[in-house]
Image (spheres, rainbow, N blue to C red):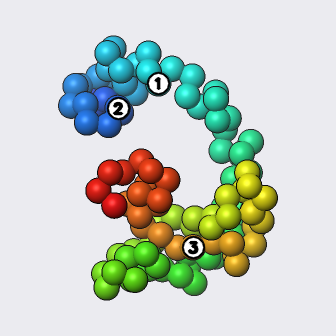
Amino acid sequence: MAARSPRFCGHAGCNALTTDAYCPQHAPQHTGRTDLRGRSDQRGYDSRWQRVRERFLMRHPLCGRCQEQGRIVLATVAHHVIPIDQGGPRLDQANLRALCRDCHETIHGRRLDG
């Protein structure tokens, strides 16, 4: 089997090259993260969700938040306005908002510049 090509560590801001997902310094911080959340299909993002998401983004191709700011940016995320874990309907398009990845990350507090 061929060796994997080096790539950048998956930890935000780390430029170390590694053949794993994370460099040795950051690997302990990310070990088991997916186990804590579970697989996407276990969290409700199954094939039915994928079809709803695809149809929604075809009908709403632009980021709604960017449009409010006068920018035109392609939407890549169907964001649940009322989160599923707070009782929001999982497959109801009325509970979705088309967002770009940057806006989605900002809404969830994973970006500091939004």
The vertical placement of 2 against 89, above or below, is above
- Which residue position is annotated with label 1? 30
Percent x, y of residue 99: 47, 69
Q: Is residue 61 left or right of residue 83?
A: left
Q: Residue furthest left?
A: 15
Q: Amino acid at mark 2?
A: His
Q: Is residue 22 left or right of residue 82?
A: left
Residue drawn 32% across the image and 51% down it: 112
Q: Amino acid at mark 3?
A: Arg
Q: Which image quadrant for residue 101? A: bottom left
Residue drawn 65% across the image and 44% down it: 40
In primary-sequence order, the first of circles 3 and 1 is: 1
Kindly indicate whether the residue at mark 3 contacts the one at mark 2 (C-beta within 8 angstroms). no
Residue drawn 75% across the image and 63% down it: 88
| Label 1 packing within 10 angstroms: few (<14), some (14-19), many (20+) | few
Residue drawn 63% across the image and 72% down it: 96
The vertical placement of 90 against 5, above or below, is below
Residue 13, labelled with which disc? none
- Which residue position is annotated with label 3? 97
Percent x, y of residue 51: 69, 67
The C terminus is located in which quarter?
bottom left
Residue 46 appears in view: no
In primary-sequence order, the first of circles 2 and 3 is: 2
Percent x, y of residue 9: 31, 29
In primary-sequence order, the first of circles 2 and 1 is: 2
Circle 3: element type:
strand
Kindly indicate whether the residue at mark 1 contacts the one at mark 2 (C-beta within 8 angstroms). yes
- Which residue position is annotated with label 2? 11
Q: Nearer the viewer, residue 31 or 105?
A: 105
Q: Amino acid at mark 1?
A: His
